[in-house]
Amino acid sequence: MSSCCKSDSKNFSRLPAHTAAEGNITPPLRERRSLAFSRWSLPAVILVLLPKCPACFAAYIAVGTGISLSVGTSAYLRLLLVALCVALMLLNVFWLVRKVQMKSHFMPGLFPACKSQTL
């Protein structure tokens, strides 16, 4: 009998974490890292490139899409975009704190209502 037929039932290092039969397919590490990077960098890049002047923002929208906006509308749209980016960054911080808490039981009382749920 060859060594490949001898299996140790306690050696699970070669088994995948999730199988397709369970319906839980984990994306490869490279995709997870690129998703995590884009999740953090996209709102930051938008905030950095966003002009402060509503007229400049309206001009960027007109050049990029061909849609003309009034200065008042562009001011509200710019404010909405800033609020959305800040909310996404805060959500990323929340997810990071939850991930650290679930893995290392760090800060156990920070989210007491979410103890039974896993991410």
Image (cartoon, rainbow, N blue to C red):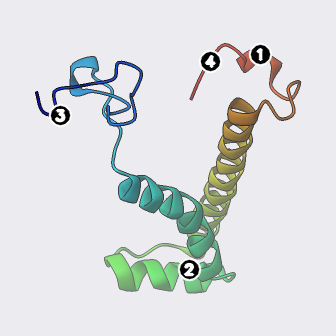
Indicate which label's residue lies in the foreground, 4 or 2: 4
In this rendering, is residue 88 above or below 22?
below
User: Which label's residue is closer to the chain start, 3 or 4?
Assistant: 3
Q: Residue 90: x percent and y percent?
A: 72, 50
In terms of image quadrants, where is residue 27? top left
What SS does tag 2 mark? helix
Q: Residue 105: x percent and y percent?
A: 78, 30
In this rendering, is residue 102 above or below 9?
below
Q: Residue 51: x percent and y percent?
A: 63, 82
Marks 4/2: CA distance?
42 Å
Count neighbours of disc 4 (C-alpha within 10 A) and say few if under 14, some if 14 to 19, many if 20 or more: few
What SS does tag 3 mark? loop
> Residue visible at 51% across and 56% down?
36
User: In this figure, which residue is indicated by the disc labeled 2?
Assistant: 57
Name which residue type carries label 1. Ala
Name which residue type carries label 4. Gln
Which numbered circle lies on residue 4?
Answer: 3
> Residue visible at 41% across and 21% down?
10
Name which residue type carries label 2. Phe
Marks 3/2: CA distance?
64 Å
In terms of image quadrants, where is residue 20? top left
What SS does tag 4 mark? loop
User: Which label's residue is closer to the chain start, 1 or 2?
Assistant: 2
What SS does tag 1 mark? helix
User: In this figure, which residue is indicated by the disc labeled 4?
Assistant: 117
User: In this figure, which residue is indicated by the disc labeled 1?
Assistant: 113
Q: Is residue 22 left or right of residue 80?
A: left
